[in-house]
Amino acid sequence: MYRSHNCGELTATHINTEVTLSGWVQKSRDKGFIVWVDLRDRYGITQLVFDEERTSKDLIEQAQNLGREFVIQVKGTVIERASKNPNIPTGDIEILVSELEILNQSVLPPFTIEDKTDGGEDIRMKYRYLDIRRNPVKNSLIFRSKVSQEVRNYLSKEGFIEVETPYLIKSTPEGARDFVVPSRMNAGEFYALPQSPQTFKQLLMVGGMDKYFQIVKCFRDEDLRADRQPEFTQIDCEMAFVEQEDILNVFEGLTRHLLKEVNGVEVEKFPRMLYDDAMRLYGNDKPDIRFGMEFGELNTVTQHKDFGVFNNAELVVGIAVPGGNSYTRKEIDKLIDWVKRPQVGALGMIYSRCNDDGTFKSSVDKFYDQDDLAKWAEVTGAKPGDLVCVLSGDKNKVRAQLSALRMELAERLGLRDPKVFAPLWVIDFPLLELDEETGHYHAMHHPFTSPKPGQLELLDTNPGDVKANAYDLVLNGNEIGGGSIRIHDKETQATMFKHLGFSEEEAKAQFGFLMDAFQYGAPPHGGLAFGLDRLVAILGGQETIRDFIAFPKNNSGRDVMIDAPARIDDDQLTELSLKLNLKS
Ligand code: ASP
């Protein structure tokens, strides 16, 4: 028996108990005649004491030779500590060791296994198994496990069946590039790794499994923006014989269950916001509603004067920054530089100070008088002491820019408290999105999303105006889930493919299996998927997902620990009927 107890559980109630513990040497203190060793395992730290007087000289010597991260087993008696440590659960006791066995030695770790380590990100990723020994990573993984368990608890109770779907499949278009896997047995042919199990879960509905879920890996070969992973995990769900309302209720229930069980937080019914309103009020389809600072559209109150910049703009829009009138001229100039950074891309920013005495002072006083500026304040909801920041230009661009400014200022003002949870549904997304570069429309969610009833005809005349039965669950400014009611009849699906630019043959070649299935009594169905990594990070009060993933990839999609991706040898290539054609 390696251990009778773990390193986190012994307290004063165990005094005089004989115990056996196993774990890693966190650190030791050597006074010559007495040695203390902190023994660590997943559960905590227990102090061991080796005392010349009470045990043997031999044992002291052995203890003196222990290095950091050695794996040891000790037998001994729980005794009361002379100087107690109130900061840890085992702080009242220590183990007077009578036997010590070294189970394994360790070379000196490349960074300290402490909460605040001296190791940088790269080195910690290379030795991720050591990083996982540290509390912040260990606790994040335990936290993730708890979330997954609660997902399973809730969905199982609701009658959902967990079904695994294959990883070696044919492409599922979700807007990204596929990772592909060459087939040895079918020379020249490739599997794609699923960007999501979308078509499979729909086929499960045709198969009569009316409530499906799966905690599943998805793969998308995208250029990695900050905090994205090429493989990530979804809580993937689908239901048959449901309308949008049914789905929103079930998964609002799941989210509420998680917030309660994991965070101990009770949340009111989630607000619902139309996509169009989210864009108008927050410039963003995943608004952070923990704070206000809603957009005020200023076209009608600004475009009657001689200020060309505003007159020529498609949209003039502002926000009130609470207490922003206290900013110095220099600070405002810095803010203007911030919005002009290429990442944000604004051409400039106009502002109006709202003085405590009810007067205003703007950067465009030449064009706008006090009455005009009072209207700016009214439309943006600015109070005396605030600062109105105004951007103008192309509608979509300006909304994105002002949204970035709103989030940045909220961060600076401390309005994005990670302990506050503000979920909402964003509904009625457009069905299609115009790709500015190609001039083609593509599915905003995916090609299997149904249009709102009665809007199919609009596809021919005003494709951009067609709304979808699609919804996103947003939490604290992050999209944590999204889904839709699906098309479930062959004709509508064929029409959809046609509008997305597929020829009949292409649609048949790629999605024949789905269209075929729809001929055999496909039930009305819909679903959604949560991004588990992000959800866990937000519930855990963190911005980045990496610590919640046991073995994450870096920004170039590499696993620096196992050194992947890697070349394969020529024999393997030949076996796969592949030849490399490398540029350099
Ligand atoms: N497959 C979709 C996605 O990955 C989710 C869904 O529509 O259920 O975003």
Image: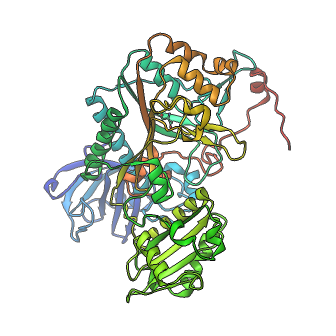
Q: Tell me where residue 168 appears, x and y as whole percent.
A: 59, 24
Task: Compare residues 444 and 297 and report the one nearer the observer.
Answer: 297
Left or right: 495 in relation to 477? right
Task: Compare residues 31 and 11 and report the one nearer the observer.
Answer: 11
For the N terminus, the quadrant is: top left
Left or right: 29 in relation to 184? left
Vertical placement of residue 223 versus 92, above or below: above
Q: Tell me where residue 222 appears, x and y as whole percent.
A: 64, 43
Left or right: 583 in relation to 192? right
Q: Tell me where residue 562 appears, x and y as whole percent.
A: 61, 43
Task: Compare residues 410 and 135 and report the one nearer the observer.
Answer: 410
Q: What residue is drawn where x is 43% and y is 62%?
A: 114
Residue 122 visible in the snapshot: no
Q: What residue is drawn where x is 49% and y is 78%?
A: 372
Q: What residue is drawn where x is 64% and y is 38%?
A: 441
Residue 213 visible in the snapshot: yes
Outermost residue on the top side: it is: 520
Identify the colour scheme used.
rainbow
